[in-house]
Image: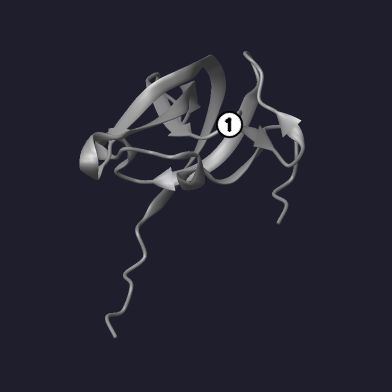
Amino acid sequence: PPVAIPTPRVEIVAVVESLDRAAHTDDLEGGGVYVTNVVSFMVVDPPGVHELLSAHGPGHPGVHDRPLLLGSVVRFNVPANWRDCDLSYGDLQDLRFANEANQP
């Protein structure tokens, strides 16, 4: 079987900028559409990277049983080439509130 090559990742600290319901669509075979929500984050660390990063997924994003709210400050790891990716909630590895330690 092919060997998976790990994608380099970068840790991001960001502030939840917007939460948009039913804002992302994927066209399905047969003409259907899969609709998901989008959360946008303003990246504040690494320093000098003041850009929006958006990810989509079903339901409201959260950390464990706590929902993300506008203004929440979070940490997560994303592929180093995140600017070129269509990110889903699952791509935000180790998502946690910025004031919390990394938890499994």
* Labels in figure, total: 1
In percent of width and height, residue 7 lies at 34, 58
Q: Residue at x 62, y 30 (%)?
A: 74
Q: Residue at x 73, y 42 (%)?
A: 64
**Nearer to us in this view, 13 or 72:** 72
In percent of width and height, residue 17 lies at 52, 14
- Which residue is disc 1 drawn over? 59
Q: Residues within 10 Å of mark 1 (few under 14, many from 20)?
A: few
Rendered view: 43 above or below 77: above
Question: What's the residue type where badge 1 is placed?
Answer: Gly
Quarter location, residue 61: top right
Drawn side of residue 35 relative to residue 76, left or right: left
Drawn side of residue 79 relative to residue 11, left or right: left
Residue at the outermost bottom position: 1
Decide if residue 49 is in sight here. no
- Quadrant containing the N terminus is bottom left
In percent of width and height, residue 101 lies at 74, 45
Q: Name the colour scheme.
A: one colour
In percent of width and height, residue 88 lies at 43, 40
**Nearer to us in this view, 29 or 72:** 29
- Quadrant containing the C terminus is bottom right
**Nearer to us in this view, 69 or 50:** 69
Decide if residue 84 is in sight here. yes
Residue at the outermost front position: 30
Drawn side of residue 41 relative to residue 87, left or right: right
Secondary structure at badge 1 equals loop
Q: Residue at x 33, y 72 (%)?
A: 4
Q: Residue at x 50, y 39 (%)?
A: 89
